[in-house]
Image (cartoon, helix red, strand yellow):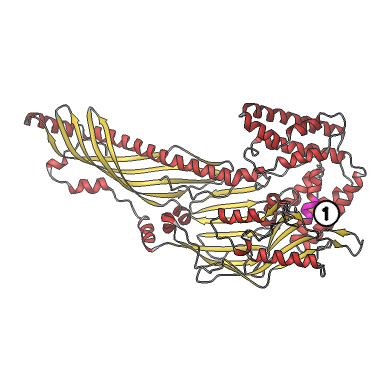
Amino acid sequence: MRRTLSCLIVFLLVATSWNTGATHIQADSPLDLVRAAKGQARSLTPEDVADSKAKLLQNVQVLESLLSSSDAEQAATWRELVQLDAMLTELGKEEAPSLEVLNRSLVAYRENQAGLELKAFTDVRDSLREYMNHLVFSATEGFSAEFDRRIDELVAQLEAYEAAPTTKLANEIGRTLGWFDRAEQIESVTAAIREHHSHPNLYVAASKQLVGSTVRDKVEATEPLRDCIMGTSIHGTTYLTGDVDLELIPSDENAVFDITLTGNAVSNNVGYNRSVSIYSTGYTNINASKRVYFDIEGLTSDWARATAATSTHVSSIAAKCRLVRNIAWKQVNQKKGQTEGIASRKAASRVAGRVDGQAGETLAEADESYQSNFRSPLVRRESFPELFDLKTTDSQLLVRLLRAGSFQLAAPGPAPELEGDFDLNARVHESIAGNFSESLIGGVMLTDVRIVEMYKEAELEVPADLAITNDSEPWAITFARSQPISVEFANGGVNVAILCQSLHQGEGYVAASLLLKDEATEKLYRPDIRISREYELTTPNDGGLQLVSKGDLKVEFIELNGEPAKSYGARHAAAVGLLSKKFNAMLKPKLPEEAKDGLSFTGKRGQRFGKLKARLAKAADGWLSVGWEQVLPVGVAEEAVAGEGDTPNAVAEESESNDTPELAQTASLDP
């Protein structure tokens, strides 16, 4: 039982609703709403600035309370990390604070450091951003004119997007919406645009059989028995055999499932009551379940419930004389119903306690894994999905996720329907990669040392071209702040692109000088570097999935107009050579290099899980759709089929087979 819940973590979360603002404009479509909003700019006032500052200082007081009640060393570390004192110094000035200093503090609140996910920190972070936005936009000259210019820009973007939606246009619309959000303008309009043009970008459905495989197991246990029932002290050994399984409970609020234990216990016992010894065998049917809930906050559960039906069969009674033995037999027969009832209740209580004890520790470990590996890092980096809708039916676990920040859009419409029934299906929109990567790694430097560490952490062999030797020169890239990683799903292919704002080489990771000249202005600028490879999506070996390259890896310098530079200098050519060598080792011609016949899982539980064989794989119109069939090992498949029938009743079978007067005598000895 302790291992039965560890595979159940599913990356999840509940929707964060879009704000509705004070400006409400009645119109027929989002585009009409935008057109009607022109000329309705609402300038931020000094009162707005004062209110947001007061809110920030109030949240700082809450944070100070947290720090004062924390370990002194930890509090000092947090205080220095978020540059709290520098921020408070700026807030205490009579003149306008330095936005540069405040921004350094704001950036620090987004570090992936333990504790920064706590509400006291996130409230200060959010209110600091609001205060900074108020400072900027309240001091903007010609704000109304800029507002109208942005409205015209958004109208043009939406017209083009509704005619032919593209990722490039979606990114542009997202940036424009982000400007209006920062300036606290037309909230109801931006919400309507998102409702119409920003849909969930991940859908997952898993069958009951598949989800059940994560916990389904055989249980065999031998335990000593010590008890006292109606004055009889019982000593014995209990042998438990049973099956652990999972039942999905229909729920639209969250994922709900019951971990069930169904089995039989047989015990060989000796009961002592004064000078009498009663030798018996006990039989108990057991049914137990523990209800588990999974939602935005993590895993929770109810106390386990159990029922037991006990029957005990006396083989002999030992006493000093025949009279005492006969009296004992008479007492056993007279108290049969009462003692078996007590034994059943005690057995049920012990089983429920066993389930709670073993499952409780596993649930705590699973919840800790969810919090530390998923929820907390995403909260710190402001990357938690705006919608993570999780629900269960009696036959499926359903997940729906939307990730799109204030400056982003998600999928332009609903996911395509899948043809066929699958044990697991996933539909992923290409927007999810760029949207997550932007908040997680945008502007982050990735060094050669960190790359090697990542391979080792994943227990993968470090490719020779990425290995660090005495002769290798240090190198690194800094990811672009916008869409650092992107994918494109179209025409049966997958295009993977990495966008960097700079390349670094040598000791100290000095930024390489890779400037280009803009032909229109003759000014120098630093181009982004795009590293990409286009793959064909294939399904080899009856159930495998493999990306096969359609051509060579590309390393391109992106001009200001968004197009690749057609010519560049020797330094650029050397950079292309270096990056081609390094990223060919990661974006290999085939992913994975060796074609498989499905997804396999290791360990005892993994072997019972079987394989997931891809029966559908399609990349088209911005969506990647994959459907898998679960193929169980022969023995496990037979067990699954057998488990669908009625559970044998050990008590009934035993009672029917015992037809002699002596064996019909029973003592209530709890198994």
Q: Which residue lies at the image location 21% right of the left edge and 45% below the top edge?
A: 655
Depicted 40 relative to depicted 493: above or below: above
Q: Quadrant of residue 125?
A: top right
Q: Which is nearer the eye, 42 or 608?
A: 608
Q: Which residues are magenta?
A: 172-176
Residue position for label 1: 154
Q: Is residue 28 something one can see in this rendering?
A: no
Q: Position of residue 614 (x, y in %)?
A: 53, 66
Q: Position of residue 35 (x, y in %)?
A: 85, 52
Q: Which is nearer the eye, 629 or 487?
A: 487
Q: Position of residue 400 (x, y in %)?
A: 60, 52
Magenta stretch: helix, strand or loop mostly: helix
Depicted 230 relative to depicted 17: above or below: above
Q: Residue 458: within the magenta?
A: no
Hey, which residue is sitting farthest left in the picture? 322
- Quadrant showing the N terminus: top left
Q: Amino acid at mark 1?
A: Leu
Q: Which residue lies at the image location 71% right of the left edge and 27% below the top edge?
A: 61
Q: Position of residue 441 (x, y in %)?
A: 69, 51
Q: Which residue lies at the image location 19% right of the left edge and 31% below the top edge?
A: 272
